[in-house]
Image: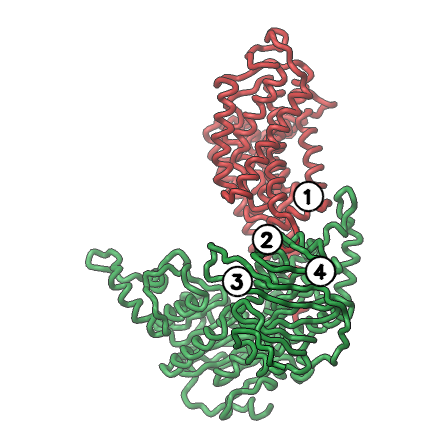
Amino acid sequence: MSPAEAAAPSLSPALLAVEGVTKRFAGVTALSDVSPEVRPGEILGLLGENGAGKSTLLKILSGVMPPTSGRIVFDGVEFAPHNPQDAKRLGIVTIYQELSLIPTLTVAENIFIGRAPLGPLGLVSWRKMEEASRGIIARVGLDLDPATPVSALSVAEQQLVEIARALSLKSRLIIMDEPTSALTETEVQKLMSIMGRLRKDGVAIMFVTHRLEEASAICDRMTVLRDGRLAGHLDREGGPIKLPKIIEKMVGRAASELYARPTLRDVAGDVRLSVRGLRTVRDPQAPHAIVLEGVDLDLKAGEILGVAGLVGSGRTELARAIFGADRIAAGTITLDGKPIAPETPADAIALGIGLVPEDRKHQAIFAALGILTNFSIAALGRYSNAAGFMTERREREALASYRKTLSIRMASPEQPIEGLSGGNQQKVILARWLARDPKVLIVDEPTRGVDVGAKAEVHQILVQLAARGIAIMMISSELPEVLAVSDRIVTMRRGRITGEMPGIEATEEKLMELMALDQKQEATQ
Amino acid sequence: MTSTTEQSQRGGINVARLLMSFGPLMFLALLIVVFTVLKPSFIDPINIFNIMRQISITGLIALGMTFVILTAGIDLSVGSLLAFCGMVAAVVAKGGTANTLSLATSGTQGYGWFAALLAAVVVGALAGGVQGFAITRLKVPPFVVTLGGLTVFRGLTLTISNGGPISGFDASMRWFGTGLIGPVPVPAIIFAIAAILCHIVLRYTRYGRAVYAVGGNAEAARLSGLRVDRILISVYVIVGFFAGLAAFVLSARLNSSEAVAGIGYELTVISAVVIGGTSLFGGIGSVGGTVVGAALIGVLQNGLQFNNVSSYTQSIVIGLILILAVAFDRWLKSRVRR
């Protein structure tokens, strides 16, 4: 660790130097004596688990709130922004996860919002605006008409428009908060190459991310935070910064403990869920959505089946079709040998199927409602009497017991769930389904937005559930995760299953190969 | 690592919740004190019961509206629906559309107060159900459906009554509007019982949980196995039922069903619910809040009248206080959150 913490040779003076910044809220220290630096033409990775203090630091840098103590020096001058405009004026632009573009306006209008070029009469000159926009968006590798409304763009394109806007503001430091979380693999590649180009132009970039592989691939240096403190600086010494090193800094223990392969478990259960020739209909409302092109799948009791595939491979669509959330065009589903045809999620749930959806915020949690309500919502029948009254004591007891077994860290059952960390929210959602004692549990991206430490806990829970005889289908775009828990793995691409192998034999390379296939090849064994 | 932040949030949220539920109540207490200082007779039981009678009509509808707004919906048709149900009740009570001062001189045979009450609430609930159906199955936003309902029900009312009132009910029906049990007006008792029932339903039943869940996140509710469409239809049935009940009580009180009854009530009702802390985005709110909100408006109207403020000025003051009350609530919350 010591070489990494040593000061890097100063090629050029830091553009942004944070000196001992501390932030306290009502007695709680969110950030303590943190001092990262960014130089022009450099990509600094800012890493840390949820709650490590990354967002607090970002908010201070972008002028959303002031630090309690410490100072920030930008371009040699002390910098104390009172609001985001102050920061912007100096050339610091923050691009948040939740994009700030206005969907009904065009790309050009969004880029020039609030500063539209004017013509001779003091009216907006649309011609000038479009011409200028064209040049700006070309810089980020976008090839589209500036008159396109933003709502017609993909998330990745919208992100690039945000970057383009930052550039047009003559930004010298671009702070990106989790820019890749909603992007597909190819889109990530494109974003990275644009980041590389900006680096060459001398722009400083602060890259906040959860995805360690990406951080490792592109960052020149990293600052890792843990529990609001500086856990260490890492430097690229000839090669990319190695993942185990980053993880160790983030969690404070060795990485090998986290993605430990479970011992080979003996799965001798019967086939629980069987899917044959499953096809879905193309929704005219969403012409670009993936449709299933005939999926065959068997899921055994007590087994964890990993479904690997990139975003857009049809993994989520498969889950939703089985769960009755999307319409099925053809094919059969049998559960314990009996054909089933769930038309709504309520039907599927009544049959004993549960789904932990991929987008927790929009599809799973009731953000403002208490943990108790969030927990019991799928099992209201179990925690109420014949007259329809909730039997709240039993409900609370059940939650208390899951709180213990899943080690959910929460203040009280009434606490709104949005106050919990991602990992604890996910555990509440898992408890929601456990309360129904499901036969089949489908989990879609179970550890998205979950801290590295809590990921291992979620994996442990899945393994325990399988041991109780629940058939688990786990969809994930993180291959290490698929490898860590799956007894068997299938890969998907373009709405089809392209391969299958036992978890014990699988490696990332083998899976990637299968994920790239168009058709299932029988010769994979 | 997250325990410290969670604890701080817990402390914050508890104080915030306290203020959230007591903010409007504090405002109400303040108003009562001010009006009492201005004119001590304001606090006389007679006047207090008078206020309770006044708020019971819009209060009843506000109870139903609480369900609707909790699902992130809105019902603009309640004022017109009230007039329509009142007219239906009158026709049933009198067995015709004659406008006479007493049943005895109308020359027709009425069906009694119970049939009138039943007709009012059934028609109200059905009308709500139809609107709920349009919202869920035809996917027309609640604002639009009930805006249409607002004119449709008014038109139906005018059609039945030919534009005029239908007056003159028998004493047993009038009792529901003007009677007293001990010193307490009957409408106030009806409102109180209904409020308690609604509170129990929302707070202690499976159905209540489902209403909050649908309003909190409709997609998550669907993926948790709730039949979201049915729940949405049901809340419009409930608000329709209460519009019918309120219509019956109002007709009984005035001894007349007016074709122009209830104009603008939707605004008073929605104001009461919102002042009571129910979020227009759904998922947050309570019956207790709505009762306080309704009382706040009632006290304000009565107190201003008591101090001889002209009705023109009254509406200015009430409008401003509504905005202030909500701003005060927001301000309290934002202070606590920080």
Question: Which of the pair A37/A111 is nearer the observer?
Answer: A111
Q: How far apart are marks 1 and 4 (CA)?
A: 36 Å
- Which residue is label 1 attached to? B202
Callout 4 amino acid: Leu
Quadrant of the rendered image containing residue B290: top right
Residue A197 relative to residue B216: left or right: left
Q: Mark 4 lies on which chain?
A: A
Q: For the residue carrying disc 4, how many other residues have a C-alpha within 10 Å: few (<14), some (14-19), or many (20+)?
A: some
Pinpoint residue A470: horizontal percent, then vertical percent.
Answer: 74, 66
Q: Pointer 1 and pointer 2: residues touching (CB < 8 Å)?
A: no
Q: Pointer 2 and pointer 4: residues touching (CB < 8 Å)?
A: no
Return the mark for residue A432: none
Quadrant of the rendered image containing residue A434: bottom right
View extreme (left): residue? A120
- Which residue is label 2 attached to? B217
Q: What element carries label 2?
A: loop
Q: How far apart are marks 3 and 1 (CA)?
A: 40 Å
Return the mark for residue A335: 4
Q: Pointer 2 and pointer 3: residues touching (CB < 8 Å)?
A: no
Callout 3 amino acid: Val
- Which residue is label 3 attached to? A291
View extreme (front): residue? A522
Callout 1 amino acid: Leu
Q: Colour of chain B?
A: red
Q: What element carries label 3?
A: loop
Q: For the residue carrying disc 2, how many other residues have a C-alpha within 10 Å: few (<14), some (14-19), or many (20+)?
A: many
State which mark lies toward you, 2 or 3.
3
